[in-house]
Image (cartoon, coloured by chain):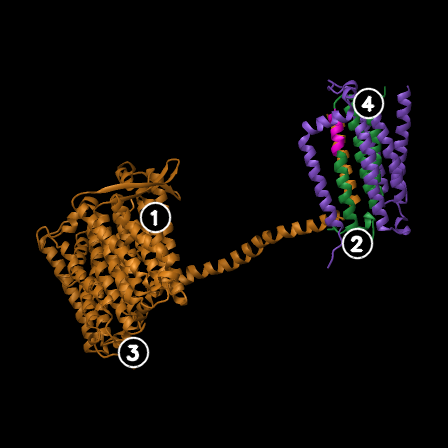
């Protein structure tokens, strides 16, 4: 039997990789993918908890997270397209319309 | 022993593909590695008796979201020199933050207390009426309201995406 | 009870209606609201007077105004003999003046505003006289001051009128400051502001002293002097008399109503109302008497040489108010109120008569440019003459009885009284002189104005002359309620009527002395009239000769003893310099502006620096957020 902590550590590592990806990459699409990565790592831990606690609530939560992730990806990519139309770049360090 | 070996395989593949995803120069490669990652995560879900989630992980993530990503990448048609510099100036800071995250999370997780009490959904209970039915029952009774709210969120996302991405016609 | 409430309420309602709807809806029909309201007050006042005459004194609390700890102030009315008398004076004179104003103010673009303010004034004055506690009295006191300011500056487009309004308001501030302190001290001393409680407890405070700058001073004397401060301001006594002559910038009905008949007598009323306090302080009484005596002769002497018809009457008012204070100071409160009551009629008549003259001459106020108006304006002339005879103390007319009684009270008031009596006799001579100088220059001789003016000379419309006739009746008959016992048994009805509130005047004298005083005052009055007759009708070059012979005296009087100039040099100018240099220059310019501008500048520069944090780059925000999350997690792990 695989201990719960293995899943959790796996989840933590993937989450941190997602964080690193989000913080370091210039490409906005990769940044989005990193966010998906983080959401997935959380899903792993939720499902693992659900299994080991013998509760179905974790799976429901994952279901909701997937729905929200889908919505987020759709809106995010739409924003990206709208942005790209105004300024043809996807590099986050070149997009600073909100600079104070 | 065998389950641990299997887990080790999946864990290594998941971590490895994650790193590949965030380091590829071409976003299309990243998305394709992401596909591999999602399939492995889905397999992990099967280990954890979550067949329904494994299915929608493949269908929604791999089938819908990733295709959407590919679609957008092709739509934008990025030039090669756009992708020359992969990382931002402050990348060491990001890596440092990620590393500290790993350390902290491991520190926290080592303190997790073992479960005080278990729920009613044991493996046998789920198997007796099937994973889908179990999830469905809970989702449509106890979690009906969040479920409906999810539908509203998706509706808003659809409308938002249409409004944002639509070309302005003068 | 409704009756008492309605007396002040009716003018207030008229004010509210006229001020809200006057400009757009009522316009030149404002008098249809104001006049019935004040007439209603008059009718109710008469009925209240009848009740009081029947011995029905009322102290009524309508509403609790302020409750704060043991500080408890009701809105309530005290209707006694004094209040009833004042109610009759205020409402009857107001009614006549309101009617007169219909003609006088006809066609003025502020017609509705004028009636609104007049109504508000009547309301305030009624509150002032009806109040049953010091704070409500103070409210009325300040409210009449405010109305006075509005009405003096009624023609505010004219700079002199606006300035006069401000002057009246500011000069009154000096007096009212003292009055306010007096009210506070009354509360501190007696623990209550209601007349009944305060006057009932005077015995317990007698002899109590307080420490002021190291001197032990009798508390009641301090209270009385502070209250008297207010009276000096409001009733234009020396040294705060300067505002009243300038107040003649207002419309003439205002001068008649506020600056002759009612508001300026508020000081007299207040001192009479507080007579239980003043009785206990001989020092304060002496001050009151001396200030009154000095004011009487001071103002009368200025009145001798002035040329502005309204200013002469204004100085005459100041002088007559001096007489009233003289009487108050002698302890003859009933006499003072009696003179207040008769004076109200003949002085209102003088003012309205002068208004009629000014109206006919299209705002000409210089009596040197009048003359011979007798044949053009018979009603005005005869009523004016009656008023002048009355003020000069000709036997049988109202002024004779009250003035003679004051002189008699002064004569019997010891050594100080004798001295003040001399002052009063001299001022009586002056009063007769300047009153008839005014008459002769205005109504007799030849017209000295322009042909244009002569062509338009006319008697005023009936709406103006009828109030004059009514007031003339008052100027003749008002005194018949106070005939001295010497001439008629039980003739002094008003004295007996007011005695329960104000007490009987002290002072004893023989009948022969009384006859002497009376005869002398009549002789003096006649002498004044005769002198004026000689100087201004027979030998018309005499005034000029006298003027050049006594050049310095003439200049001194003509320039009103240079009091205005003195105040300008010693108070106004230093205040202006101080406000310009210190307050505007330093406090406003440096301190306030420094703080007001400094804070936004500080925030602005801080913002300029802080905005650099906001790069607009997504990953910068991401890193900050991640580091924040790390800190939170770190705290959760390492700090239990």
Same-subunit check for callouts 2 and 4? yes
Q: Is residue C640 above or below residue C368?
A: above
Q: Are marks 1 and 2 in contact (CB under 8 Å)?
A: no
The image quarter in which residue C383 lies: bottom left
Q: Mark 2 or mark 4: which is in front?
A: 2
Q: Chain of mark 2?
A: A
Q: Chain of mark 3?
A: C
Chain B in the picture: what colour?
Answer: purple
C66 within the magenta span: no
Q: Where is residue C410 drawn, in percent x and y?
A: 19, 54
Q: Where is residue C209 drawn, in percent x and y?
A: 33, 39
Provide the major secondary structure of the magenta segment.
helix
Provide the residue span drawn in magenta. Answer: A56-64
Identify the residue under disc 1: C138
Chain C in the picture: what colour?
Answer: orange
Q: Are marks 3 and 1 in contact (CB under 8 Å)?
A: no
The image quarter in which residue C403 lies: bottom left
Same-subunit check for callouts 3 and 2? no
Decide if residue C60 is on the left or right side of residue B111. Answer: left
- Chain painted green: A
Identify the residue under disc 3: C453
Identify the residue under disc 2: A85
Q: Is residue C199 above or below residue A13?
A: below
């Amino acid at each position: 039997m695989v201990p719960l902590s293995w899943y959790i550590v796996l989840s933590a590592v993937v989450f941190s990789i997602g964080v690193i990806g989000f913080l370091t990459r210039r490409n906005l699409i990769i940044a989005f993918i990193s966010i998906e990565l983080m959401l997935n790592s959380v899903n792993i831990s939720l499902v693992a908890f659900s299994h080991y606690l013998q509760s179905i609530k974790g799976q429901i939560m994952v279901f909701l997270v997937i729905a929200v992730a889908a919505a987020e990806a759709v809106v995010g990519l739409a924003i990206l397209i709208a942005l790209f139309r105004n300024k043809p770049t996807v590099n986050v360090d070149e997009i600073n319309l909100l600079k104070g | 022993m065998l389950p641990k070996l299997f887990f080790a395989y999946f864990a290594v593949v998941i971590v490895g593909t994650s790193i590949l995803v965030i380091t590829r120069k071409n976003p299309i490669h990243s998305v394709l590695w992401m596909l591999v990652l999602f399939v492995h995560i889905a397999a992990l879900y099967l280990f954890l008796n979550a067949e329904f989630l494994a299915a929608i992980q493949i269908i929604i993530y791999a089938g819908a979201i990733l295709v959407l990503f590919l679609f957008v990448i092709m739509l934008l048609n990025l030039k090669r020199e756009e992708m020359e510099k992969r990382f931002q100036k402050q990348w060491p800071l990001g890596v440092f933050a990620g590393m500290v995250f790993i350390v902290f999370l491991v520190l926290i997780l080592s303190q997790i207390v073992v479960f005080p009490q278990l729920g009613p959904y044991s493996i046998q209970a789920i198997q007796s009426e099937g994973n889908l039915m179990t999830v469905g029952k809970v989702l449509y009774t106890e979690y009906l309201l969040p479920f409906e709210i999810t539908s509203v969120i998706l509706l808003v996302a659809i409308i938002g995406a249409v409004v944002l991405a639509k070309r302005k016609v003068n | 009870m409704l009756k008492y409430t309605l007396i002040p309420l009716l003018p207030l309602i008229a004010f509210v209606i006229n001020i809200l709807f006057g400009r757009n809806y009522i316009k030149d029909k404002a008098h249809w609201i104001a006049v019935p309201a004040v007439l209603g007050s008059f009718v109710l006042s008469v009925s209240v007077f009848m009740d009081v005459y029947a011995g029905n004194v009322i102290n009524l609390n309508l509403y609790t105004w302020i409750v704060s700890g043991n500080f408890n102030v009701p809105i309530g009315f005290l209707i006694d003999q004094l209040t009833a008398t004042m109610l009759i004076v205020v409402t009857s004179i107001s009614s006549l003046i309101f009617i007169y104003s219909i003609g006088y103010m006809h066609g003025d673009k502020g017609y509705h505003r004028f009636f609104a303010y007049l109504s508000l004034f009547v309301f305030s004055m009624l509150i002032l006289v009806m109040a049953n506690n010091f704070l409500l009295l103070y409210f009325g006191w300040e409210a009449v001051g405010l109305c006075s300011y509005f009405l003096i500056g009624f023609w505010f487009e004219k700079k002199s009128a606006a300035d006069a309004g401000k002057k009246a308001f500011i000069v009154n501030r000096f007096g009212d400051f003292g009055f306010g302190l007096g009210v506070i001290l009354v509360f501190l001393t007696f623990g209550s502001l209601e007349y009944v409680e305060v006057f009932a407890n005077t015995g317990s405070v007698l002899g109590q002293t307080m420490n002021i700058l190291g001197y032990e001073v009798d508390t009641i004397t301090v209270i009385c002097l502070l209250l008297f401060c207010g009276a000096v301001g409001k009733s234009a006594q020396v040294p705060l008399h300067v505002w009243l002559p300038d107040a003649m910038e207002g419309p003439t009905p205002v001068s008649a109503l506020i600056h002759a008949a009612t508001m300026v007598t508020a000081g007299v009323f207040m001192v009479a109302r507080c007579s239980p306090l003043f009785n206990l302080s001989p020092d304060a009484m002496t001050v009151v008497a001396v200030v009154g005596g000095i004011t009487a002769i001071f103002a009368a002497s200025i009145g001798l040489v002035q040329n502005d018809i309204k200013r002469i009457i204004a100085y005459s008012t100041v002088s007559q108010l001096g007489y009233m204070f003289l009487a108050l100071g002698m302890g003859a409160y009933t006499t003072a109120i009696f003179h207040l009551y008769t004076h109200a009629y003949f002085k209102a008549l003088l003012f309205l008569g002068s208004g009629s003259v000014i109206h006919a001459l299209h705002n000409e106020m210089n009596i040197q440019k009048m003359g011979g108006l007798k044949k053009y304006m018979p009603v005005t002339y005869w009523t004016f003459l009656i008023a002048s005879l009355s003020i000069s103390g000709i036997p049988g007319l109202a002024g004779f009885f009250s003035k003679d009684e004051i002189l008699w009270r002064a004569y019997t008031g010891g050594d100080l009284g004798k001295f003040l009596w001399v002052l009063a006799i001299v001022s009586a001579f002056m009063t007769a002189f300047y009153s008839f100088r005014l008459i002769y220059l205005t109504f007799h001789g030849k017209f000295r104005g322009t042909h244009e003016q002569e062509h338009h000379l006319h008697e005023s419309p009936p709406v103006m002359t009828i109030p004059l006739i009514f007031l003339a009746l008052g100027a003749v008959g008002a005194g018949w309620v106070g005939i001295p016992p010497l001439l008629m048994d039980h003739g002094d009805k008003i004295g007996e009527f007011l005695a329960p509130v104000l007490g009987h005047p002290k002072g004893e004298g023989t009948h022969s002395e009384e006859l002497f005083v009376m005869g002398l005052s009549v002789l003096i009055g006649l002498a004044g009239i005769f002198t004026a007759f000689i100087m201004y009708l027979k030998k018309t070059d005499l005034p000029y000769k006298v003027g050049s012979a006594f050049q310095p005296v003439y200049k001194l009087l003509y320039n009103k003893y240079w009091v205005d100039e003195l105040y300008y040099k010693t108070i106004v100018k230093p205040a202006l310099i101080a406000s310009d240099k210190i307050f505007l220059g330093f406090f406003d310019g440096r301190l306030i502006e420094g703080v007001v501008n400094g804070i936004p500048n500080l925030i602005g520069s801080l913002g300029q620096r802080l905005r650099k944090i906001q790069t607009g780059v997504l990953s910068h925000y991401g890193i900050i957020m991640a580091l924040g999350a790390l800190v939170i997690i770190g705290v959760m792990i390492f700090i239990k």
